[in-house]
Amino acid sequence: MFTVTEVPRASQPTDTPKFPLWLLGTGVFALLGSGALAARLILEMTVWTWEQGPQMVGFKLIHGSGVLLVLFPFLLISWLAVAAAYTLWRLLKRRPLSRISLVAMALSVGLLGLLDRPYGFWQRLFIDRLASGPYAARLFTYDAAIGDLATVKAFLARGVAVDVRANGQTALHGAAVAGQVEVIEYLIAAGADINATDRLGASPLDVAISEKRPEAAAYLADHGAKAVRGPKPSNVAIPDLTRPPARLERSEQK
């Protein structure tokens, strides 16, 4: 009788789903730096806003020792593009994908989306706390000045008075300073005093004229506004709305 002996087959090399170590390391580095930046900016837009009022988000960071953090999102975007291209190449070659690479890319997209959230998003997220806090008037006027209509509506919906004053100005003054016609339209419809004067005696129309905002001035004039001018120039800049009242007072005394 013959005995058939099965010859063992040579083991076939397997393509393990590896992610290049240098690429993974770069991604982790970019993620950590971008995460630190996101944490700092969110801190400014939430806790610091609760405690100190409107923030010039990122200003202190850019002008301080943390300026390098601003570069990390650009590094992360570049890394994400390279990682996506590498993943696509493996798909085309029908090679298995690395789970860690997919997780890292998902985290990158999520973090970049978080960094893209504007100041108003965080204000609206915590609107109940802000609307009942000591800086509601300043935030309301600030948002009107930067044209954040969604947040202006949110403050009004939580009971903030349409003519509440911050540093002597109403939200209508703030919108007129920056020529925010859409916000002006909404505030007037909400019952804002169109001829309210600031602490320098100027009306929103006079402020719009002084700041050379012709569209805002025309809209105000068409709705019955008067150009009431105070004894001093009334062009309080938008950044002044973010400063503590004491500093603003000192600047006017000079």
Image: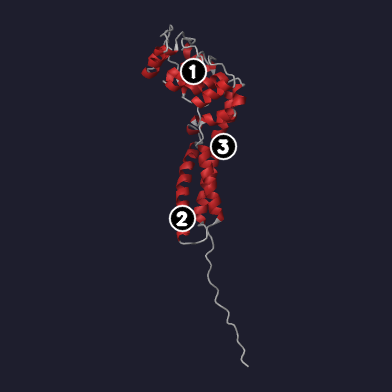
Q: Position of residue 85 (x, y in %)?
A: 44, 53
As measured in the structure, the alpha-carbon distance from the residue carrying label 1 to the one carrying label 3 is 34 Å
**Tag shown at residue 39:** 3
In the picture as drawn, the residue positioned furthest to the bottom comes out as: 1
Q: Identify which amino acid the numbered label 3 is placed on.
A: Ala
Which amino acid lies under the numbered mark 2 shown in the image of this protein?
Leu
Q: Earlier in the sequence, mark 1 or mark 2?
A: 2
Q: Is residue 236 above or below residue 123?
A: above
Left or right for 254, reference 8: left
Q: Is residue 127 left or right of residue 203?
A: right
Q: Is residue 65 above or below residue 228?
A: below
- Viewer-side label of 1, 2: 1
Tell me how many marks there are: 3
Task: Specify the farthest residue to the top.
Answer: 231
Instruction: Tell me which residue sits at (46%, 24%) in the image.
Output: 147
Secondary element under disc 2, as helix, strand or loop, is: helix
Tell me where residue 238 appears, x and y as whole percent.
46, 21
**Any part of residue 114 in sight:** yes
Q: Nearer the viewer, mark 1 or mark 3?
A: 1
Q: Earlier in the sequence, mark 2 or mark 3?
A: 3
Q: Which residue lies under the disc numbered 1?
A: 187
Instruction: Give above or below for 122 relative to 96.
Output: above
In the image as oriented, which residue stretches furthest toward the front? 189
- Location of residue 184 (image quadrant): top left
Sequence order check: which comes first, mark 1 or mark 3?
3
- The residue drawn where x is 54% and y is 47% is 106
The Cα atoms of the two marked residues, 2 and 3, are separated by 31 Å
- Residue under pointer 2: 88
